Amino acid sequence: MERTRLGNYWRPATLEAALRILVEQAPRLLAGGTDVYPALTQAAAWGAAPAPALLDLTGIAALRGVTRTGGTWRIGALTPWAVLRDAPPAPGFRALAEAAAQVGGRQIQARGTIGGNLCNASPAADGVPPLLILDAAVELASPRGLRVLPLREFLPGARRTARAADEIVTAILVPVAAAEAPSVFLKLGARAHLVISIAMVAASANGRVAVGACSEVARLWEEGLAPIDDVRASAAYRRAAAEELVARARARLAA
Amino acid sequence: MIRLTVNGAPRALDLPGGTRLSAALRETLGLTGTKIGCDAGDCGACTVLIDGAQACACLTPLGQCEGARVETVEGLAATPEGRALIARFHAAGAAQCGICTPGMLVAATELLRANPAPSEAEVEAALGGVLCRCTGYRRIIEAVRGAGPAAEPGAVGARLPRLDGAAKLDGSARFGADLAPADALWLKAVRSPHAHARFVLPDIPAFLAAHPGIRAVLTARDVPGRNGYGIYPHIKDQPVFAEGEALYRGDAVAALVGAREAVERAELPVAWTPLPARHDPEAALGGPPLHAAFPDNVLAEGLVRRGDPEAAFAAAAHVAEGAFRTSFVEHAYIEPEAGFARRIGERIEIWCATQAPAMDREEVAGVLGLPLEAVRIIPSHCGGGFGGKLDAGMQPMLAVAAWVLDHPVRAVWSRPESMAASTKRHPARIAARAACDAEGRLLALDFEGLYDTGAYASWGPTVAGRVPVHATGPYRVPHVRARARAVFTHQPPSGAFRGFGVPQAAVAQEALYDRLADACGMDRLEFRILNALTPGDVTATGQRLAHSVGQRECLEALRPRWAALRAEAARRNAAGGPWRHGVGVAGMWYGIGNTGMSNPSEMRLILGADGRLSFRNGAVDIGQGSATVLAQIVAEALGLPVVAIAQIHGDTALTPDAGKTSASRQTFVSGRAALAAALDLRAKLNGALGWDGARVTVNGEPYAGPGLEGHGRFDPPTVPLDAEGQGTPYATYGFAAQLCALAVDVRLGTVRLERFVAAHDVGRAINPTLVEGQIHGGIAQGIGLALMEEYIPGRTENLHDYLIPSFGDVPPIECILIESPEPLGPYGAKGVGEPALVATAPAILSAIRDATGAQIAHLPALPHRVLEALGHGR
């Protein structure tokens, strides 16, 4: 059942316990740790090291793994990249598998989770374009009950989510029909491994295409892009590269 | 209580669940083989296996390890599978500095358990989460696959595995952060977040009263001696703690010392008033000055003038000119700065990662106001240096703290702190013109380099002095005007970085020579062969080169590969598609040791009355292999096996001053001193020497005579440069030529490197595996300089925004060793550390231009810059 507190840290075994701790202690949520700990390092570098209370969700086995119920694929929020990389459950998950194989190294893939990737809400989150083309939705639990938001509503902007303070992301839901057509993922970065995307594209044979790292939040291709200049590339380059990647992704699907 | 299994043993740890596994392993269990390079999952040095799967221990909360099986390098080293892998790494030279090695071994173990015969691609994918800054990865791939070079016994010329390798491979080597007294206090520097700011420190007694656990806040007032340090005796301009004004983002203004948690959790409320900052050396020229002693902000100027360049340009058949720009490059050694200091009565001892213990000793003596004899520097294993650990770094600050508090004090810089505070490669802006006659003979060079030297002098004068000497490249150019200036800005101090400004200059010179070759319709390689320096030629400084000038041989050695790779590129280009293939070539030369100034090394060999031989070797091995190379030289000279030579390294109390590990000098200068020491000892012994496994024998009998000492000293003969830059700046030069084959995606601007062929004249390869290791690693850093590395203060202060080459970014490398013996060198040897890197970036740019016609003039050639150069950008 519920784990006892270890320092400023809880690792409960059930969602109910986690929700109760969340409401009572207002801790920071922790899954694979692959974004939380780097943020702590960065914060400590130029001031006082933060020591947040941590609610570690990884003890909740029910939030891990991919299952099918009726017309819906359910990806537990705590499913690590490695599972998505090695065992895409349907052809439409291939883009997500290809993205998973390029998120950091094997170390990150073994522990980083798909739910954490969405909650971190980076403009360059590799999980978002493959899920956008799957028409994915995000399931959130709170003491008030469950709600489901379309992925695009869950991510209103860079580094922002629609998660309320008392909510925990429990799953990503994908309509089975949206995952039937095969998909591909193309990532563009300035080195071979461990690279944050300059631009990335996920495309499905059903015609859906999404582009990441070229706007605050990844978008469907028909919505247009809003890229910025940053240390990785210019905005103009991102536009040109995204267009080229989309063409290549479509060509790969057609091949 | 958290229960887990570590290396097969059950453990119960009473630590908070959020504790990083890396901290629990290192600090609670004492398993310091797991290294910390970034605490952010970017470098993979802390890779361990959790239930058989790779994980970054720095990202894993201990609470998640409840009931888990954790394996570290110490555990692997105790198993047959681990020992077999370690043996392959050892023989192949897959470990250099050793800081990434535990992570590499652990990652490889996960792979090999599932796949005992992996392909190259499978190795790259499985180990891709670990960064290495030394090896260029190729030897690691070979070692994992069991395909590396084999180890050889012997002395000079043998592929002897590095003598300090075993400790680096089993996790027992102690780096800067791996050792400190148990009661040491922790020090955290307080640094300016602004590029230029006035500041007022808070009421310190009140701060201390509010922060129990913090023992002291140290400021400029606490520095007992001179509050300034720096490489040059007359420019001690970098304060231990700034006084009233900070000159770059990262400038230290104070330090908190006390219990670790108290220090880490506290923030000193400094009142900052940002001031206008100059980030551009052109804007900084002429003032207002950063330092009163340099009113026009020109720290140093180097000039070389020979012949009549203007007349030569006027008469030339072809002239090429261009402007080039390079960026700050961060050393990105995987080991951030770390160490401890302790006061022992009226003396002080410092343990730290350093390339220059004798210089650190002088700096510490200066800031403490102590005689040199009162300071002892004990170098730790050094987890990468590349010039970045030639500056005193944290040593002055640690020394002040331990001295003032009379208590041991330790510090470990975080990755962001290391990147913000430490020195960088000078960004350069170069305008240059070159001319040749109709037959392709070089006539003239005009070179103007503006080097951004940042906020403090560091090695800026060295760079300004070295660049114009090398500006022609390794070619005969009769008419030369070359000037380099180091200019102060409110940027991080630029210091020493593998090549001291020469790699930037080579980018300009080689690009112009490609264009001249095209202009006269010559093959680019043949153009270089025609112009290559040969024995008897006179350089731009008026130095007549007599011996060991292997430039032409290096270039000629590339001919077969050049022809084959060019033909292959042409064939592949004929097939069409977005990838355009090209082949580039570049030459380089590099003066070994200091520029026109004394640069001695001293070595001692002591044969004890017990028959044991002690080699007092003050040269710091930062992974390049000097500990092994110098032992090979001594062994050769004495006719003994290397195992007979017990070494004491670097410790300033026990070794004479070998000079710093820089300027590619340890093999040449310290190697020659070691040879002299060995010959001196040999001359004091009559009869045939041998080794019985424990003692030196003479004529077969264990040595039982009096204690004897062999002493050796070498100072390479040079003549200082005069006002026109004429003189003999170096006693010898390394020469090289590198060829690069690559493909450019002309729609995305990405570059895929396919092959390097590197021909290096090293005089004599004392240890071919180590020489090749330097070449591989130099090429990897040249790739970074050319294609991806750009440090921007405040923007790229971590190893995911600042990119260094990863697995997969370094293609196969073929090394061709040319041995044109240097009479001054030990057994003919010269240096290779920096020559390894210099030709790489220009060869890449030459190949991009060959593939696409695009001349890249702004490094790094990130995809958007390549696309712009191709004319497809905005």
Image (spheres, coloured by chain):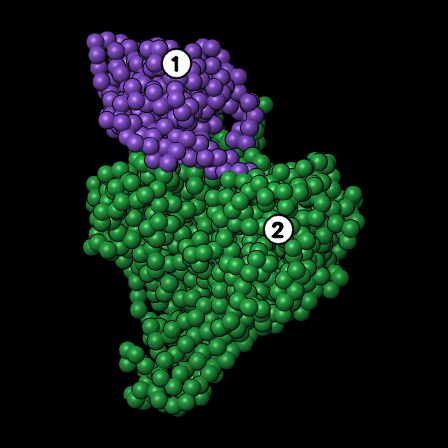
What residue do we see at 40% from left, 17% from top?
A166
Q: Chain B is drawn in which colour?
A: green
Tell me if residue B623 comes above or below residue B856 in the rendering: below
Q: Mark 1 lies on which chain?
A: A
Give a yes or no on whether discs 1 and 2 share a subunit. no
Place of residue B437 in the rendered image (x, y in percent of width and height, measured from the top left) = 66, 50
Tell me if residue A233 comes above or below residue A48 in the rendering: above
The residue that label 1 is drawn on is: A151
Q: Which of B691 and B633 is in front in this view?
A: B691
* Numbered badge on residue B218: 2
- The quadrant the C terminus of chain B occupies is top right
Helix, strand or loop under label 2: strand
Q: Using the numbered discs, state the Cα–Cα distance from disc 1 to disc 2 in whole angstroms.
A: 51 Å
**Quarter of the view holding residue B90:** bottom left
What residue do we see at 51% from left, 23% from top?
A238
Q: Nearer the viewer, residue B485 or A248?
A: B485
Place of residue B314 in the rendered image (x, y in percent of width and height, measured from the top left) = 75, 48
Place of residue B550 in the rendered image (x, y in percent of width and height, measured from the top left) = 51, 62
Helix, strand or loop under label 1: helix
